[in-house]
Structures are given as structure tokens and as C-alpha cells.
Amino acid sequence: MNDWKRLTQYLLGLKEDELIEQDKISKVKCAVERLSVSDKTIILKRYGIEQERQYTLKEIAAEFKATQEAIRQREARIFQTLRREIKRR
């Protein structure tokens, strides 16, 4: 499964067969593009999108000079933002 599909599936709570609709992936991509640069970086690295691999919370926390818990909380907030943005469209 590609990385955008995995993120879309997680955000929208979809099963694999429900993900066939390319429009849903497109909505997730658009919502991610609207994030701040740092929020977008966190999500893309966590899901390995446009990256060579998926990054751990520990690795991302080190990059942002933050705790793993702070990055986890930020990730949760980013997901809420993305879900709201997707529902609005």
C-alpha cells in the first residue's frame, strides 16, 4: 500500500476496499498541503511520504529539539486539523 493510501486510510477510518476512490486521497493531499511547513514535515516523515523511509517519533523529536511526547501531541493535533479540513471539502 502506498504511503498516501495509508495516511488517508488512517485519517478517514477506511477499509482497503473503501479507499479505491482516488478523490479521497486527493482530498488528503490537498489538506496536507495547507499545513504549516513544520506540521507537514512531521506528517510526511511519520508516514514516509516523499521520504526514503518512515521516521520514528524519537527521530523527529531530535530534529525539532522537542520531546517525543510533544511530537506525539502535535501529531494528534495535526490529525484533528486534517480531519476537519477534509470534512469541510
Image: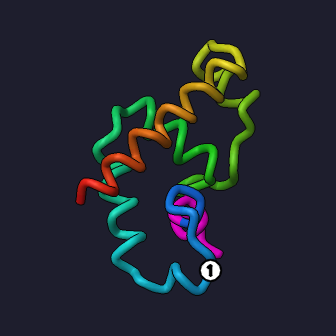
The question of residue 4 being in magenta is answered with yes
User: Above or below — where is 43 with respect to 57?
Assistant: below
Q: Amino acid at mark 1?
A: Glu
Figure quadrant of the C terminus? bottom left
Name the residue at the left extreme: 89
Residue 73 picture location, percent across and down: 60, 25
In the displayed structure image, the side of residue 68 where residue 8 appears, left or right: left
Q: Which residue is mark 1?
A: 16
Which residue shows up at 65% across the image and 75% down it?
Answer: 1
User: Above or below — where is 58 with respect to 48?
Assistant: above
Q: Start and end of the magenta stretch?
A: 1-8
Residue 33 picture location, percent across and down: 32, 49
Residue 41 picture location, percent across and down: 49, 38
Q: Residues within 10 Å of mark 1 (few under 14, many from 20)?
A: few
Pick the residue in front: 58 or 88.
Answer: 88
The question of residue 40 being in magenta is answered with no
User: Above or below — where is 75 with respect to 5?
Assistant: above
Which residue shows up at 74% across the image and 38% down it?
Answer: 56
User: Above or below — where is 85 with respect to 16?
Assistant: above
